[in-house]
Amino acid sequence: MSRYIALAVLLFLPLPIVIVVLSSFTSAGYLSFPIKGVSLKWYAEFLGSADWLKVLGTSALLALIGAFVSTAASFAAAWAVVRHKMRFGTAYETILLTPLIFPHAAIGVIMIVTLSGLGWLGTFTGLVLVHCILTIPYAYRPVVAALRKADPALEEAAASLGSRPWRTFWQVSLPAVRPGLVTSLLFSFIISFDEVTVTMFLVGPFVMTLPVQVFSEVLESASPIIAAVSAALVLFTSLMVFILDKVVGIQFFVERD
Amino acid sequence: MPRSLRISLLLLPSGLLMAVFVYGLIRLIGSSLIVDGTLDFTYYEAIFSRSDYVAMLGRTLRIAAMTTFFSLLLGFPTAYYVARYRGNRNILLLLIIFPWLVSIVVRSYGWVVILGPRGLINGVLTWTGVVERPLKLMYNDFGVILGLVHVLLPFMIIAILSVLMQIPRTLEEASMSLGGRPAHSFRTVLLPLAMPGVLTGITLVYLMATGAIVTPLLLGGLGDTMLGTEIFQEVMHFFDYPKAAALATVLLVTALAVVLPIQLLERWLSARLSDGGAL
């Protein structure tokens, strides 16, 4: 019995994604499935639209900066917790994970209040700040796990052989946790790139992200261009998952530390 | 550099980010409670005195509860199957992780394409002549719950799977070789050990379902609102920020009232399990 449920679920999960990708190849002017005639015209329209490409650029830059900042911040925090065995380290880790236990609609309003207080509502800077906060829980876990596995004796050995602290850090400590850092970067990049529920409260006339744009288009129209843009998002995510699988292996997501 | 200064510097970036979050949280609760400098419950009275808002709150909790229930019902067997799979497990993991990482907008939109009046199901049904007019498969609770289960199920599976992968298969085999029937071994050996993962999954799915906006809006429409979609409307269409802040605070309180006890239970269970104590 459990076997049939499992197989049904494993088909059910990718189903709507496959359908969206297939429906993007329609030649009809409205979205329907099964599609009426095959064409690539909606992709041409997407790639020929300066507006869509600008939004794609914003999303990519936002996710890139957010991933670097939250990975760096997580790495520093993990270093204090693991290497300096700071007091209340576990409590601090719990605090870093709090964005996970808040409902997204509530985080959206919290961030409106925060950004309007700072004067950053509807700005790119505001989005970067919020995406850093949202991705910290995702960036922290891989990097702290990697740091726990790395052997501090290597650093002691380097130091006893006369290596200066900074050199030890760059040439010994950092390479030892490289897979963890790369995982943090990729994981927080994906989370940031795909984020919509919180971000849609914070965009404005001057800044827009790709998933939020897709969402508002779906609410307003049924143009198949949305399917083409969605398919591009899916392609992008597949690429990230592929790299993650190569760097740490897909089982990373179901490991406990 | 003294150790305490070094630790403070290392915590500075992440601490600042979290401080910004806490600052917003305090201002949120403040803006819903303080009107013209005095403590005022006007916004909360306005919410709880309106029967449509109370009904909306009830609907949110009901949909979140049903989403959690179905996610557990489907998620546990799937996690169990994947954990005990003897072949190439990575392909199965990919079928769970990949959809999980695709944006919820894309996945919810996929359901619009499947369930919509010109969608896959209605297309097949009208073409084969089973029905004459398209069935109403979305813009109702069915569509919303189906979409939410699809979007949140991976969280449940991953939470349970990460616990089940740590339980050696031999433990069940030992129980059965000592004469325990499969159902009995499952209930007395596997289920108690899997409980922390189940509780984590329930927490995550319930939280995300109560605070969801995108899926309920795309598959439920603007008619029957949930807390999340109501907040979205107050902000985007009516620009009523204090009311949105009050609704967001209500959302926080109702979510944490369910989630915190479960988290405490989960911690207690995990601590007992790692102490090797009998349950």
Image (tube, grey):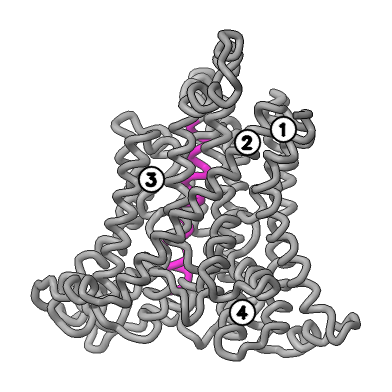
The residue indicated by pointer 4 is B231
> Can you tell which of label 1 and label 3 is closer to the viewer?
1
Vertically, is B158 above or below B186?
below
The residue indicated by pointer 3 is A1
Q: Is residue B122 visible?
A: no
Magenta stretch, main secondary structure, is: helix
Q: Which residue range is magenta in the image? A: B143-165
Q: Residues within 10 Å of mark 2 (few under 14, many from 20)?
A: many
Give the x, y percent position of residue B29.
77, 72
Chain identifier of the residue bearing label 1 in the image: B
The residue indicated by pointer 2 is A78
Are callouts 3 and 4 both on one chain?
no
Give the x, y percent position of residue B180.
53, 26
Kind of residue at disc 2: Ala
Q: Residues within 10 Å of mark 4 (few under 14, many from 20)?
A: many
Which residue shows up at 48% across the image and 23% down it? A171
Residue B147 placement: quadrant: bottom left
The residue indicated by pointer 1 is B271
Kind of residue at disc 1: Ala
Which residue shows up at 50% across the image and 29% down it? A174
